[in-house]
């Protein structure tokens, strides 16, 4: 799943205190803008090469014991009640790629809508199904 990621603060919003409707509207606008400028590439299936939505974050991407909060707006302006499994995986990959977290550092992610928590960490594994060159090709400057 491909998502656009952006700190809600860059849009004048706060994922913890702004109205959900305002966050949904902003995330949907980001999704549409990114779709007009960028076409994702999936290395194995062209059917999977589309932007599914936008995840607005609290901008706290550097490692911390404290949870980082986000809202995932996907498909037809649907909001995930959880921090979003594929979104947490992507945030971990991005944080690791940017040098903001190290291998085996567990991060906690909170849903801004329900407060539910997911954890994740970057691990070194052989036979990776998600290669770093795929991530490199998906990152926008």
Image (cartoon, rainbow, N blue to C red):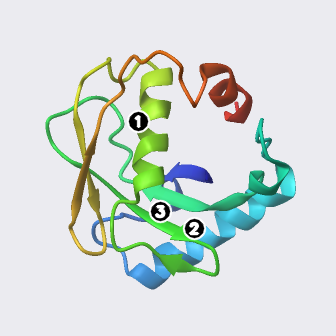
Mark 1 residue crowding within 10 angstroms, few (<14) / some (14–19) / many (20+): many
Which residue is drawn at the image coordinates 26% and 29% (left, top)? 63
The residue drawn where x is 30% and y is 64% is 111
**Viewer-closest of 95 and 85:** 85
Judging by the rendered image, the residue that carries numbered circle 2 is: 27
x and y percentages locating residue 128 in the rendered image: 53, 23
Q: Secondary structure at mark 3?
A: loop
Q: Which residue is mark 3?
A: 12
Q: Which residue is mark 1?
A: 92
Give the number of the mark in front: 1 or 2: 1
Q: Position of residue 123 (x, y in %)?
A: 35, 22
Q: Is residue 120 above or below residue 30?
A: above
Q: Nearer the viewer, residue 135 or 34?
A: 135
Q: CA distance from mark 1 to mark 2?
A: 20 Å
Q: Earlier in the sequence, mark 1 or mark 2?
A: 2
State yes or no: discs 1 and 3 in contact (Cβ < 8 Å): no
């Amino acid at each position: 799943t491909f998502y656009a990621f952006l700190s809600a603060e860059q849009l004048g919003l706060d994922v913890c205190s702004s109205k959900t409707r305002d966050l949904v509207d902003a995330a949907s606008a980001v999704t549409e803008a990114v779709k007009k400028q960028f076409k994702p590439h999936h290395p194995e299936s062209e059917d999977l090469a589309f932007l599914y939505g936008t995840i607005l974050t609290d901008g706290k991407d550097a490692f911390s014991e404290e949870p980082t909060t986000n809202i995932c707006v996907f498909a037809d302006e649907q909001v995930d009640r959880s921090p979003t499994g594929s979104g947490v995986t992507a945030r971990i990959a991005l944080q690791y790629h940017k040098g903001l977290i190290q291998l085996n550092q567990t991060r906690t992610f909170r849903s801004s809508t329900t407060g539910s928590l997911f954890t994740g960490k970057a691990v070194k594994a052989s036979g990776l199904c998600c290669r770093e060159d795929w991530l490199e090709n998906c990152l926008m400057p």
